[in-house]
């Protein structure tokens, strides 16, 4: 329940009995959460949100996302680590159209890249830009 309002902010009583600002809760929810770089990278739409970040510190494979619903879009803001030239493969559930994939392994140290996509049925259509 809302316990106090003022201007564009409102506070509410959380289940644990603490008072929280709606604005701070929204900012926490929307803050990018980093995917963990490893040989096999897990991506959970609930844990990581639909706009996670990734510093690629390994030659890796991005596994099939979990908790991304049909029709939902997502975006991963990535970058190479200080070594650079790391490769990123994708599980078989990703579909990359010819010409829509930048060569991530050709990127130098700290170079950025973006992976954007949409779930369509059981597949994840993505495009990669650098």
Image (cartoon, rainbow, N blue to C red):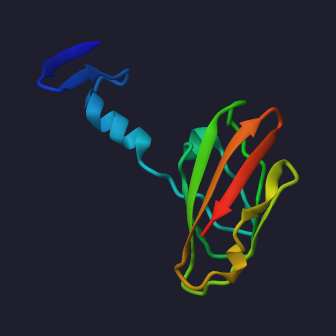
What residue occupies the far right of the structure in this picture? 92
User: 78 left or right of 68?
Assistant: left
> Which of the two residues, 61 or 17, is positioned nearer the viewer here?
61
Q: Residue at x 21, y 23 (%)?
A: 10
What residue occupies the far top of the structure in this picture? 1
What residue occupies the far left of the structure in this picture? 6
* Spot occupied by residue 112 in the image (x, y as percentages of width and height): 54, 71
Placement of 24 over or under 126, stated as above or below: above
Q: Quadrant of the C terminus?
A: bottom right
Q: Residue at x 22, y 24 (%)?
A: 11
User: 24 left or right of 62?
Assistant: left
Snapshot quadrant of residue 29: top left
User: 90 left or right of 42?
Assistant: right
Count of numbered labels shown in the rendering = 0
Q: Residue at x 59, y 58 (%)?
A: 35
* Spot occupied by residue 8 in the image (x, y as percentages of width and height): 17, 27
Placement of 67 over or under 84, stated as above or below: above
> Which of the two residues, 85 or 16, is positioned nearer the viewer here?
85
Q: Quadrant of the N terminus?
A: top left
Placement of 127 over or under 14, stated as above or below: below
Placement of 105 over or under 123, stated as above or below: below
* Spot occupied by residue 84 in the image (x, y as percentages of width and height): 62, 84
Q: Residue at x 57, y 65 (%)?
A: 78
């Amino acid at each position: 329940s809302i316990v106090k309002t003022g201007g564009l902010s409102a506070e509410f009583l959380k289940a644990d009995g603490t008072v929280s600002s709606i604005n701070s809760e929204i900012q926490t929810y929307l803050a990018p959460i980093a995917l963990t770089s490893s040989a096999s990278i897990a991506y959970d739409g609930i844990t990581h949100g639909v706009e996670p970040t990734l510093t690629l510190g390994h030659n890796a494979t991005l596994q099939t996302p979990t908790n991304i619903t049909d029709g939902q879009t997502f975006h991963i803001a990535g970058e190479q680590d200080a070594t650079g030239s790391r490769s990123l493969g994708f599980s078989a559930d990703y579909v990359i159209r010819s010409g829509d994939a930048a060569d991530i392994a050709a990127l130098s140290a700290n170079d950025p890249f973006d992976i954007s996509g949409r779930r369509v049925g059981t597949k994840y259509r993505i495009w990669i830009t650098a």
